[in-house]
Image (cartoon, rainbow, N blue to C red):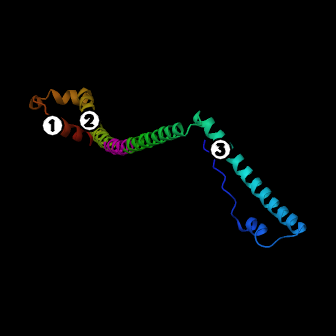
Amino acid sequence: MNTPTPTPRTDAAWSGSFDGEQMSAGQTARALRECSQKLETELTTLTAERDHLHAQLRALTLICGTNDANRFETWIDRANARAEKAEADLAALEQCHDDNCRAVVRLDAELAAAKERLRSEAMDDYASIKDLQRELATERARLNWLESPSGMDWQWEPERLTVSRASIDAAMKEDAK
């Protein structure tokens, strides 16, 4: 690490203290004391700054495993490349998530349409079953009537030898009166 080269003091307090007229010993001592206090304050500030910079360097050394400036740049470049890759992966995942969401919405719509179609078919089947049940009940009633005593007599009448459903229904109605 490069350390800065100290520069000669050129501030006005330093040069103003010793230039010009001859000073008395007391004035010189006072001027030297003021300069000494300024230098101590500046030294304290620079020491704190140095300690802070050393702490930052130790932290970077712990993180990166080196204190070589070229390796810091390499480490930072690698870290930036990893961050960019992570952002690209995240964008790809978000796109995949969006695609999956659209697919789920589409599949939900298809499922709702299929459910409605099945419900409609079930209602049609239910109506067909009811019609078949009514037909079966009618046929059972005909058979029951034909097997009854009045149906048996009716079947053997000579004019009834050709039996049709309509003739059976008409005979059932007459017998019911």
Residue behind mark 3: 56
**61 versus 26 height, above or below:** above
Image coordinates for residue 155, horizontal then vertical, percent: 16, 28
Image coordinates for residue 31, horizontal then vertical, percent: 83, 66
Distance (Cα) linking label 1 and label 3? 111 Å
Residue 76 magenta-highlighted: no
Residue behind mark 1: 167
Distance (Cα) linking label 2 and label 1? 21 Å
Question: Do labels 1 and 3 touch, CB within 8 Å?
Answer: no
Amino acid type at mark 2: Leu
For this view, does 94 lie left or right of residue 124? right
Of residues 160 and 50, the one nearer the viewer is 50
Residue behind mark 2: 132
Secondary structure at numbered mark 1 = helix
Q: Earlier in the sequence, mark 2 or mark 3?
A: 3
Farthest bottom residue in view: 21
What residue sits 78% from the left and 67% below the top?
18
Farthest front residue in view: 22
What residue sits 36% from the left and 45% below the top?
102
Distance (Cα) linking label 2 and label 3? 90 Å
